[in-house]
């Protein structure tokens, strides 16, 4: 294989692309409110695994792309994503040592922060009202972390991503 293809950015980029696709994929109205934050989960994983490659700048750029894909006010998801990845990156050594269940609980708190930042920015910009449905994705995301973490770790080990 060529050195360019063996670069870890190809493999990280594939997981980010899949997360973006899952973030915009249509869902039935009954479960749309429970859509996990796929992009946030994938970025949190890569920040924990490879903090020197996936960082706040990556989160800001991908949050901006998510704003474009979702058709929301530009910069709202970028700000929230950058804030969550900042907290994750500044504590990655502590978070790595927790069990997967503890990580899931901590991610729930991080994703509640993510959704509150999105709500506050939207409240300031477009006057929305708070609903408990804003927090449903944080719950489903923390549940999906229990599945996603081992899958991405196996993927990283299989392809020797460093």
Image: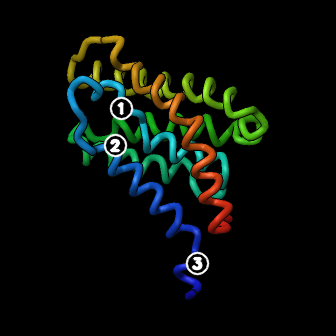
Tell me: 16 left or right of 76.
right
Q: Residues within 10 Å of mark 1 (few under 14, many from 20)?
A: some
Residue 90, position in %: x, y?
68, 39
Residue at figure coordinates x 35%, y 46% from the top left: 22
Say which element carries label 1.
loop
Q: Secondary structure at mark 3?
A: loop
Lower sequence index among marks 3 and 1: 3
Q: Residues within 10 Å of mark 3 (few under 14, many from 20)?
A: few
Q: Does residue 30 appear to the left or right of 5 in the view shown?
A: left
Tell me the distance, in whole angstroms, between the alpha carbons under discs 2 and 1: 8 Å
The residue that mark 2 highlights is 23
Q: Residue at x 49, y 24 (%)?
A: 113
Residue at (53% x, 82% y) in the render: 4
User: Mark 3, mark 1: which one is toward the viewer?
Assistant: 1
Position of the C terminus by quadrant: bottom right
Question: CA separation, marks 2 and 3?
Answer: 27 Å
Q: Which residue is mark 1?
A: 35
Q: How many marks?
A: 3
Mark 2 or 3, nearer chain start? 3
Circles 2, 1 touching at the beta carbon (< 8 Å): yes
Sequence-first disc among 2 and 1: 2
Judging by the rendered image, the residue that carries numbered circle 3 is 6
Residue 39, compared with residue 10, is above or below; it is above
Looking at this view, is 56 or 36 the one in front?
Answer: 36
């Amino acid at each position: 294989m060529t050195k360019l293809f063996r670069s870890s950015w190809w493999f990280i980029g594939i997981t980010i692309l899949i997360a973006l696709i899952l973030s915009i994929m249509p869902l039935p109205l009954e479960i749309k409110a429970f859509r996990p934050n796929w992009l946030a989960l994938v970025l949190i994983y890569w920040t924990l695994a490879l903090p020197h490659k996936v960082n706040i700048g990556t989160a800001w750029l991908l949050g901006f792309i998510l704003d474009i894909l979702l058709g929301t006010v530009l910069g709202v998801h970028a700000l929230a994503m950058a804030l969550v990845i900042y907290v994750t990156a500044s504590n990655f050594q502590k978070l790595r040592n927790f069990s997967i269940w503890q990580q899931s609980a901590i991610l729930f708190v991080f994703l509640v922060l993510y959704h509150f930042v999105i709500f506050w920015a939207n409240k300031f910009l477009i006057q929305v009202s708070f609903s408990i449905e804003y927090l449903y994705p944080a719950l489903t995301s923390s549940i999906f972390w229990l599945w996603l973490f081992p899958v991405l770790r196996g993927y990283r080990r299989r392809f020797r991503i460093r």
